[in-house]
Image (spheres, rainbow, N blue to C red):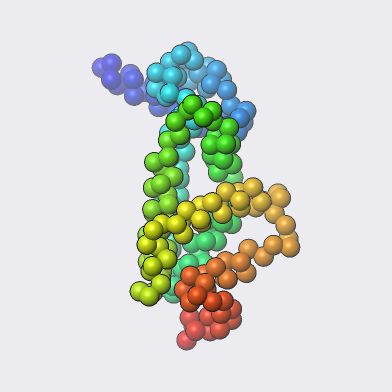
Amino acid sequence: MAQVKKKEKRNAILKSASRLFRENGFLGCRMEAIASDAGTAVANLYVYFPSKLHLFYDVWTPLIEARMLKLAEDARQIDDSRQRLRFIFLSLWRDMPREDNQFAKNLMEAIITAPDSVEKPHDILKWCEDFLNELIGECLPADRKFLVADSKLSFLSWMAFDGFVVNVGKRESSKRNIELLINHFADLLLYGEYRGLTAVADSNS
């Protein structure tokens, strides 16, 4: 019986934290406010979560897992390799940063501002990198799969994601053509050079 109550309390904390992180951002969300909203004491929060960073990760993890699984499901419906790659990177660099849940920006705030003494839960980030690496690898011809051999490409892609989180949306410049950028990137991955309209013609032939 005690275990059931413990699970319910943890879920209540996660529910309150999810809403308050969404409304106030990571920096603007205080543990006292989460505790009050969840109907518990601040000290109890630290029984379940070692830090606000860990609490945020527990909120964010199922969201990003579900989003990546949906990305993979949709991408695998696209037969053409170039179009599938374009879809993957448009989702990662344009659509996900634009989505109105604030968790991408919150994640950046959480990692940047966490004290050095707080151990950062990196497992989900590594999972995202590995998942993306596999998804990209499925698009590449055999002679280009060396690009995903060490996961550095997916690491670079997620680092770029952070930059797009900052620049996409209200700050997005009309001078930046993200689709053209992704066309270049997809061609470099597939062919080692930018083919532009030629690649489109080839994919449609």
- For the point 73% across and 63% down, the residue is 175
Q: Quadrant of residue 200?
A: bottom right
State the image coordinates of residue 124 (x, y, percent, origin top left).
41, 42
Farthest residue, direction bottom: 205
- For the point 41% across and 57% down, the residue is 151
State the image coordinates of residue 31 (x, y, percent, origin top left).
53, 21
Residue closest to the eye, 82 or 1: 82
Above or below: residue 27 compared with residue 76: above
Q: Quadrant of the N terminus?
A: top left
Above or below: residue 50 compared with residue 74: above
Above or below: residue 109 compared with residue 189: above
Residue closest to the eye, 129 or 172: 129
**Residue 173 in view:** yes
Residue closest to the eye, 23 or 179: 179
State the image coordinates of residue 128 (x, y, percent, origin top left).
42, 49
**Residue 106 in view:** no
State the image coordinates of residue 103 (x, y, percent, origin top left).
54, 40
- For the point 45% across and 57% down, the residue is 152
Residue closest to the eye, 70 or 160: 160
Number of numbered discs overlaid on the protein picture = 0
Q: Quadrant of residue 73?
A: bottom left
- For the point 55% across and 61% down, the residue is 90
